[in-house]
Image: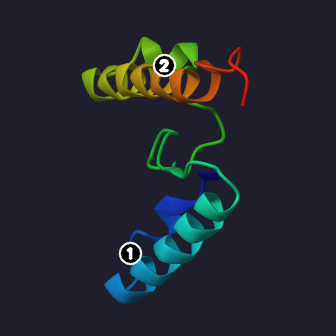
């Protein structure tokens, strides 16, 4: 499961974040899934329409390049979590 709009709730009260996190986590674990929080992966912390991999961003500032490197690492992690072990019998 991917909580893709977590950046929207970042500014909310800590108690609201905790309750939402517990609800999502219990829903994911009840169905045998993992929970990954996503958000702020676009330029400007989620305000942009293009992803970090956009070529204009890659040629841009050092901060945008660091963000792109972080996204690449995250993509590798998600691919590992999703696809490693799929060939094993459950």
Q: Residue at x 48, y 39 (%)?
A: 43
Q: Position of residue 63 (x, y in %)?
A: 28, 29
Q: Do labels 1 and 2 touch, CB within 8 Å? A: no
Circle 1 packing at 10 Å, graded few (<14), some (14-19), many (20+), is few
Number of marks in picture: 2
Q: Position of residue 89 (x, y in %)?
A: 73, 23
Q: Nearer the viewer, mark 1 or mark 2?
A: 2
Disc 1 element: loop
Q: Residue at x 36, y 29 (%)?
A: 67
Quarter residue 84 falls in: top right
Q: Kindly give the residue lying farthest to the left in the view shown.
A: 62
Question: Distance from label 1 to label 2 (Cα)?
Answer: 28 Å
Disc 2 element: helix
Q: Is residue 87 left or right of residue 67?
A: right
Circle 2 packing at 10 Å, graded few (<14), some (14-19), many (20+), is few
In the picture, which quadrant includes the C terminus? Answer: top right
Q: Position of residue 61 (x, y in %)?
A: 31, 22
28 up-or-down from 59: above or below: below
57 up-or-down from 34: above or below: above
Residue 11 is tagged as 1
Residue 88 is tagged as none
What residue did someone put label 2 on?
Answer: 76
Between discs 1 and 2, the one toward the N terminus: 1
Q: Residue at x 57, y 22 (%)?
A: 79
Quarter residue 85 falls in: top right
């Amino acid at each position: 499961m991917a909580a893709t709009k977590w950046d929207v709730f970042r500014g909310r009260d800590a108690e609201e974040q905790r309750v939402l996190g517990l609800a999502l986590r219990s829903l994911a674990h009840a169905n045998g899934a993992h929970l990954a929080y996503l958000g702020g992966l676009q330029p400007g912390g989620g305000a942009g329409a293009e992803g970090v991999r956009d070529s204009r961003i890659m040629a841009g500032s050092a901060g945008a390049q660091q963000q792109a490197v972080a996204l690449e690492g995250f993509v590798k992690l998600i691919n590992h979590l999703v696809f490693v072990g799929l060939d094993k019998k459950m």
